[in-house]
């Protein structure tokens, strides 16, 4: 299986769109196109022909460019079968456990509800790449607009089990804000403090903080650590069920 060549396109105030090219076939996927112009411009600059759109969920800042890009390129739009009526132009529906091939690069599909009821993620194992939309962020997770804490905690546990070297290609540059919150719930977490220093340095140089590495997220992201006794102790919930700890951390973030 070929490894993807992945390019990041920052748009709007804090969104990331990704272009992913499979080199053997030349197939190119756009992941969660919020807008059209910057995507077509970057593809033209690179000399890449867009063949696919991969959508994780229906929010406008993830599908806003679907129809215009499809009209301009004739591309296939892949999205969640769990949400068929809210993905503009979707031509291929995928479900949990499905695989989808972008040329010779294969993605495994995960159903990861919580942020929305139909959210999915795409894991390209051979490229160490997870396109997770708004389910998992660096040092954060998505708001629970349509799902429950139990759903989101289950979704995050599934993603947490991927290999340590998996790169988290999330859809927003939220890391600094997420860290400001995270240190209020687990101030003595040394991995979190190291991530704080690293992100400050990256952002001071104008560089993005994502993709991040899953192994680092496991150690520092409080939303992946709801079953860690030290996190439960830090928020006064020793002995409570992990889903309850997760719900409390999410509640605190919502009002932070």
Image (tube, rainbow, N blue to C red):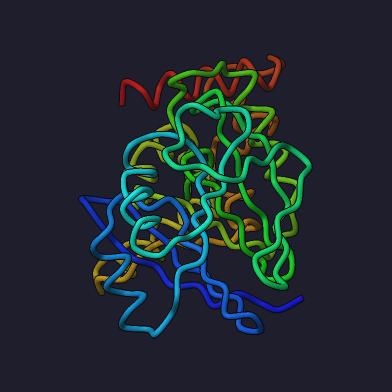
| Quarter of the view holding residue 11 | bottom left
> 8 or 197, which lies in front?
8
User: For this view, does 236 lie left or right of residue 98?
Assistant: left
Identify which residue is drawn at 68% across, 44% down: 159
Quadrant location, the N terminus: bottom right
> 219 or 2, which lies in front?
2
Identify which residue is drawn at 37% across, 53% down: 33
Quadrant location, the C terminus: top left
Q: Position of residue 111 (x, y in %)?
A: 67, 35
Please determine whether, in this image, residue 36 is positioned above or below residue 92. below
User: For this view, does 51 lie left or right of residue 71?
Assistant: right
User: For this view, does 41 lie left or right of residue 4?
Assistant: left
Please determine whether, in this image, residue 26 is positioned above or below residue 98. below
| Quarter of the view holding residue 97 | top right
Identify which residue is drawn at 38% across, 50% down: 175
Q: Position of residue 110 (x, y in %)?
A: 69, 41
> 138 or 12, which lies in front?
12
């Amino acid at each position: 299986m070929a490894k993807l060549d992945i390019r990041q396109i920052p748009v709007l105030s804090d969104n990331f769109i990704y272009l992913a090219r499979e080199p053997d076939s030349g197939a190119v996927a756009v992941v969660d196109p919020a807008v059209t112009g910057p995507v077509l411009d970057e593809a033209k600059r690179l000399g890449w022909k867009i063949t696919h759109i991969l959508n994780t969920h229906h929010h406008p800042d993830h599908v806003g460019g679907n129809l215009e890009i499809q009209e301009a390129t004739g591309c296939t739009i892949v999205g969640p079968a769990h949400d068929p009526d809210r993905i503009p132009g979707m031509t291929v529906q995928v479900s949990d456990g499905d695989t989808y091939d972008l040329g010779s690069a294969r993605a495994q599909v995960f159903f990861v509800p919580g942020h929305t009821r139909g959210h999915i993620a795409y894991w390209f194992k051979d490229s160490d790449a997870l396109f997770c939309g708004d389910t998992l962020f660096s040092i954060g997770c998505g708001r629970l607009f349509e799902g429950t804490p139990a759903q989101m905690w289950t979704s995050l546990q599934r993603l947490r089990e991927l290999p340590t070297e998996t790169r988290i290609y999330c859809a927003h540059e939220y890391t600094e804000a997420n860290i400001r919150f995270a240190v209020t719930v687990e101030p003595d977490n040394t991995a979190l403090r190291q991530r704080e220093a690293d992100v400050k340095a990256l952002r001071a140089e104008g560089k993005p903080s994502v993709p991040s590495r899953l192994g680092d997220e496991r150690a520092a992201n409080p939303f992946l650590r709801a079953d860690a006794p030290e996190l439960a102790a830090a928020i006064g919930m020793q002995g409570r069920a992990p889903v309850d700890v997760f719900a409390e951390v999410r509640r605190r973030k919502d009002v932070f």
